[in-house]
Image (spheres, rainbow, N blue to C red):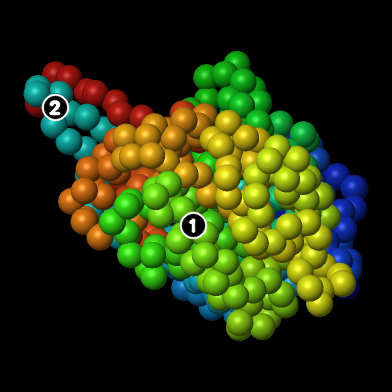
Amino acid sequence: MKIIDQIYIDGAFVTPHGDELFDLFNPATEQVIGRVRLADAEDARRAIAAAKRAFPTHSRSTKAERIAMLQRMHAAVSAREDDLLDAIIEEYGAPVAWARWMARHASDVLLQAAKTLDSYDFVRRAGTAEVVMQPLGVAGLITPWNSDAGFICGKLAAALAAGCTAVIKPSEMSAIQTRIVTEALHDAQLPPGVVNIVTGRGDTVGAQISTHPDVAKVSFTGSTAVGRSILRAASDTFKRVTLELGGKSPMIVLDDANFTEAIPLALSAGFMNSGQACVAGTRILVPRARLREFEAGIAAAMAQFPAGDPRDPKTHIGPLVSRKQWDRVQRYIRIGIEEGARLVAGGEGRPAGLDAGWFVRPTVFSDVRNDMTIAREEIFGPVLSIIAYRDEAQAIAIANDTPYGLQAYVCGTDVERAAAVSAQIEAGRVLVNTLTHEPAAPFGGFKQSGIGREYGTFGLEAFMEPKAVLGVL
């Protein structure tokens, strides 16, 4: 049983003022594996005050000093990769191959931020003016449970590179992972107050960050509903806000696609991170003339995507993070059946042979209309919908007929044609015949998938304001 009873404020591990205890579970066994003492609003205020005190010095640090800081952070987080891997599997249930990527990603984003910073010009010319990119101030970073370490390190890297100080509110469901990251960041010997990490609930710690007048910027990743409430709360003090929210990403399979390649790509896009990914390709758009062929291929390929023990290298889909999430996904599967969608694979309940754990049968529906609930709402589990289309124009129309616009996928053998289709899709990122990630490229959504961008220079500038100075040259 792991007991986590400290938070991190002003360069030190301290006992929270809050006294609520929260159980931590292994989602593969449903057993309690730890307990965390949650911070409260008073702890958040202390963290914000520490970040405010540290801001004047950090905001005047040189580019070289910030690069050195990010490099130390990278080395420290890298040194804890194996510990983080174990925690991701035990506390979150990610399959081991995916968990390794997640653990490595947490340190990689720090190094990528250092590279972006190295080539970034904080001062530039605009006509007769000198334009200086100036850090905003204290940044409040609110992160979710589906990639705890990666989101903490990614948001923090951009904030510190820009010259901001930070108060981080991670998900209380990821406290073991957070503790490992916090210890690593402490080992990197950052100046006191530059980084503060307070694990607590959204309606206490998160609310304080969203409303406190000394927080200049909020960066949040999570649900669209919570993002909407944060935007309202931040408006009273005109905080700058970056929101990376939900998605209902389309995977357009063009009529010239090679199904031998397209089907594994579609299932990988849909089932990534056990379906708990905002970028998951959950709407698979298939030409009606090839629908039955595609369905047969999907049914045959499902054996390559087994659900089970996350420590088994053969497992592709692990358990969902909580009983609440499992119940939510089961409800969506029932709704799909009730609304007339046809099961190609999966269905309600646990996979065969699994009597415990929050495992979902990997599920694929066909005969789905784009107005069905399972095609409209973000399920956040391994549940995919096949939607037939008549022609390319209709495929693009269906892809864009959603309140979301985070990511999309296009699959076809004619790359120029696929690129032309991608240009017409309303999404922050479109992946053509690939599932790769580019850390230098901006990431974020159109429409209700969010506001602003992360990664690369776009993510760096999200923590700054331009100041124009005239008459000095």
Give the amino acid type for the residue marked by disc 2 in the picture.
Ala
Name the residue located 37 percent from the left edge and 34 percent from the top edge: 394
Q: Position of residue 82 (x, y in %)?
A: 60, 80
**Secondary structure beneath disc 1?**
helix
Q: Nearer the viewer, residue 75 or 407?
A: 407
- Say which quarter of the image contains residue 162: top left
Instruction: Name the residue tied to disc 1.
Output: 292
Closer to the eye: label 1 or 2: 1
For label 1, the crowd category at 10 Å Cα-Cα, with few meaning under 14, some 14 to 19 and many 20 or more, is: few
Q: Position of residue 247 (x, y in %)?
A: 53, 41
**Secondary structure beneath disc 2?**
strand
Instruction: Name the residue tied to disc 2.
Output: 126
Name the residue located 22 percent from the left edge and 43 percent from the top edge: 420
For label 2, the crowd category at 10 Å Cα-Cα, with few meaning under 14, some 14 to 19 and many 20 or more, is: few
Give the amino acid type for the residue marked by disc 1 in the picture.
Arg
Left or right for 405, reference 381 = left
Name the residue located 65 percent from the left edge and 44 percent from the top edge: 341
Left or right for 39, reference 436 = right
